[in-house]
Image (tube, rainbow, N blue to C red):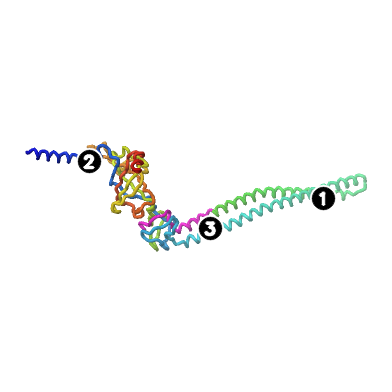
């Protein structure tokens, strides 16, 4: 081989080695940017389900429609629930009337007791007067100035007054005891009113549940609800996806996490946006590898073991106010690149 050919081959070899080092060295020596294409757009969407059973009367949203929190999505036929609420309202009125009656009767009892006390006082005075008359007639009969008949009549009046006083005393005791009975009746009426009010509140809740509203701002997806369909509590009728709060889940290899931590800057390239870059920051790293939560986990203690580099899910939050964010859809494939250099170095680069 001629000397010129040898030099040419050597130059090509050096160039090839340089290219190889340029391509491989970042992964071997530790790159300032860790990149993965095992990433996708995600969002904490909500599955909307009815809380009561019934037939759908009206559907007020279309597929892929944007909705606001509290916006009416669908109506369940509420005639049965409205009738139940009216019945509960009537029961509440009856319970209120019973409580008022029990309270008034208890308040009236104090007057009845006062009346019984007055009767006892009158009978006591009558008995005292009869005793004085008996003493006087006995004295007159003893000195020959009165008759035995008058003394006997006076004795009869004492017996009658004593009997009337005993009856009035018994009535007074009974009326005082009635206070406890009436108090118990009033307490029972209060309990009945509270139970009726609770039933009315529950019926009102049931009636309000016939109005199915959006729990958050977002876009309607998987709309399965149709007019006339019968729905049951917990059955999924549609989903509301909050696209404004979309984030990225990137699965990095465990060997890429050495210098990765929360707060680092991230650039996201979405496949469907023709290479447009979105900025974000790393919010958190998952507590375990993806396979840890899999339904069927590999058992490395059986069979032949082959070491496989595991991947750790990382949550990346996109910075608000960027263009094209509204075009993101859950599940889109993206490529994420995390800047793992120190924060001070990042500021220097940004200033330059």
Look at the image and give the residue range highlighted in magenta.
Answer: 198-223
Residue shown at the point (58%, 51%) measured from the top left:
191
Q: Which residue is mark 2?
A: 22
Q: Nearer the viewer, residue 221 or 304?
A: 221
Q: Which residue is mark 3?
A: 88
Q: Give the mark nearest the N terminus, 3 or 2.
A: 2
State how far apart marks 1 and 3 are (Cα): 61 Å
The label shown at residue 313 is: none
Mark 1 falls on what kind of element?
A: helix
Q: Nearer the viewer, residue 19 or 352?
A: 352
Q: Which residue is mark 1?
A: 157
**Is residue 201 depicted above or below 35 in this figure?**
below
State how far apart marks 3 and 2 are (Cα): 79 Å
Residue farthest along the left direction in this orientation: 1
Q: Give the mark nearest the N terminus, 1 or 3.
A: 3
Residue shown at the point (28%, 46%) measured from the top left:
38
Residue shown at the point (85%, 46%) measured from the top left:
132
Number of residues whose C-alpha sits closer than 10 Å to that of mark 2, classed few (under 14), some (14–19) or many (20 or more): few
Number of residues whose C-alpha sits closer than 10 Å to that of mark 1, classed few (under 14), some (14–19) or many (20 or more): some
Q: Does residue 131 appear to the left or right of 73 in the view shown?
A: right
């Amino acid at each position: 081989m001629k000397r010129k050919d040898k030099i040419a081959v050597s130059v090509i070899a050096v160039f090839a080695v340089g290219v190889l080092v340029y391509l491989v060295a970042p992964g071997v020596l530790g790159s300032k940017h860790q990149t993965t294409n095992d990433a996708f757009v995600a969002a904490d969407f909500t599955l909307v389900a009815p809380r009561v059973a019934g037939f759908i009367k009206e559907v007020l949203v279309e597929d892929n429609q944007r909705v606001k929190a509290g916006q009416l999505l669908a109506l369940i036929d509420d005639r049965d629930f409205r009738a139940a609420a009216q019945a509960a309202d009537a029961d509440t009125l009856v319970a209120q009337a019973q409580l008022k009656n029990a309270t008034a009767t208890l308040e009236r009892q104090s007057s009845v007791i006062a009346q019984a006390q007055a009767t006892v006082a009158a009978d006591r005075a009558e008995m005292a007067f009869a005793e004085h008359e008996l003493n006087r007639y006995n004295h007159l009969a003893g000195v020959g100035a009165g008759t035995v008949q008058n003394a006997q009549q006076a004795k009869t009046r004492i017996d009658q007054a004593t009997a009337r006083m005993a009856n009035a005393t018994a009535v007074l005791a009974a009326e005082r005891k009635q206070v406890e009975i009436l108090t118990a009746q009033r307490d029972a009426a209060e309990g009945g009113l509270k139970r009726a009010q609770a039933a009315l509140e529950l019926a009102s809740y049931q009636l309000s549940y016939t109005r199915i509203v959006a729990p958050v701002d977002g876009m309607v997806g998987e709309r399965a609800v149709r007019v006339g369909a019968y729905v049951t509590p917990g059955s999924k009728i549609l989903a509301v996806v909050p696209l404004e709060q979309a984030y990225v889940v990137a699965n990095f290899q465990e060997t890429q996490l050495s210098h990765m931590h929360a707060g680092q800057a991230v650039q996201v390239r979405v496949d469907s946006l023709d290479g447009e870059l979105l900025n974000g920051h790393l919010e958190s790293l998952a507590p375990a590898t993806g396979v840890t939560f899999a339904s069927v986990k590999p058992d490395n203690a059986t069979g032949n073991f082959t070491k496989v580099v595991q991947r750790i899910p990382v949550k990346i939050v996109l910075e608000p106010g960027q263009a094209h964010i509204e075009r993101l859809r859950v599940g889109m494939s993206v490529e994420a690149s995390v800047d793992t250099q120190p924060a001070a170095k990042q500021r220097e680069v940004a200033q330059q």
